[in-house]
Image (cartoon, rainbow, N blue to C red):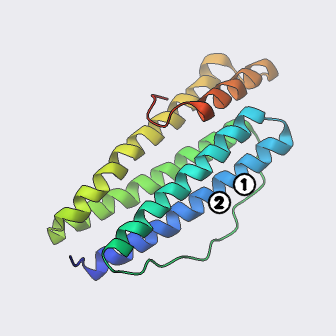
Amino acid sequence: MKISKNMEKALNDQIALEANASNTYLAMASWCEVTGYDGGASFFYAQSDEERTHMLKVVHYLNDLGIPATIPAIKAPSGNYKSLETTLKTSLKNEQVVTAAIHKMVEIAQKDKDHSTYAFLEWFVNEQVQEETKFETLLQKFELIGRDKLAINEIDKILAAEATAPADAPA
């Protein structure tokens, strides 16, 4: 099966996006761990692993088509976060960027009548709905519980539980 050069570029760009997301979550996990947010650290380490898994899905898809995946250089993420809430807000924005890129690839697949890649991308479309909902729900906790030290400790516990929840469980 052949895919268009446009789709090949978009898929390789997605590899870079997923790799950068993985590194960003790794930086957030490290910040949380040093700051004393054990739940946040566990949560973001798990997110980092998940993004790497997403990257590998795209790498394998291209390789299965006989197209060597382009493994990108990764820019260093910021390691300076102001609060647990800021890490979650940044995460939601990052997920929205990933969602937009996936939707763009779906449009390319539709335009190219590339049914195989379209079917491959469906999983990512559904995954992004779950990811955005997860971060929106977590951010709501600051409105519901508050932002004082006890509330943030409670939210950190929620993040710990989220890190150990099965991947397909609702956020």
Q: Residue at 51% of width from left, 61% of height from top?
A: 18
Read off the residue under disc 2.
23
Q: Are marks 2 and 1 in contact (CB under 8 Å)?
A: yes
**Circle 1 — which element?**
helix
Vertically, is 143 above or below 108? above
Amino acid type at image mark 2: Asn
Does the rendering let one see residue 18? yes
Checking the image for residue 91, the label placed there is none
Q: Residue at 25% of width from left, 68% of height from top?
A: 108
Q: Residue at 28% of width from left, 51% of height from top?
A: 122
Q: In the picture, which quadrant includes the N terminus?
A: bottom left
Residue 98 or 51: which is nearer the viewer?
Answer: 51
132 left or right of 27 in image = left
Residue 75 or 72: which is nearer the viewer?
Answer: 72
- Where residue 112 sits, quadrant-wise, is bottom left
Residue 138's spot in the image, x, y percent? 57, 30
142 left or right of 14 in image = right
- Where residue 43 sits, quadrant-wise, is top right
Residue 32's spot in the image, x, y percent? 77, 42
- Where residue 130 sits, quadrant-wise, is top left
Residue 149's spot in the image, x, y percent? 81, 23
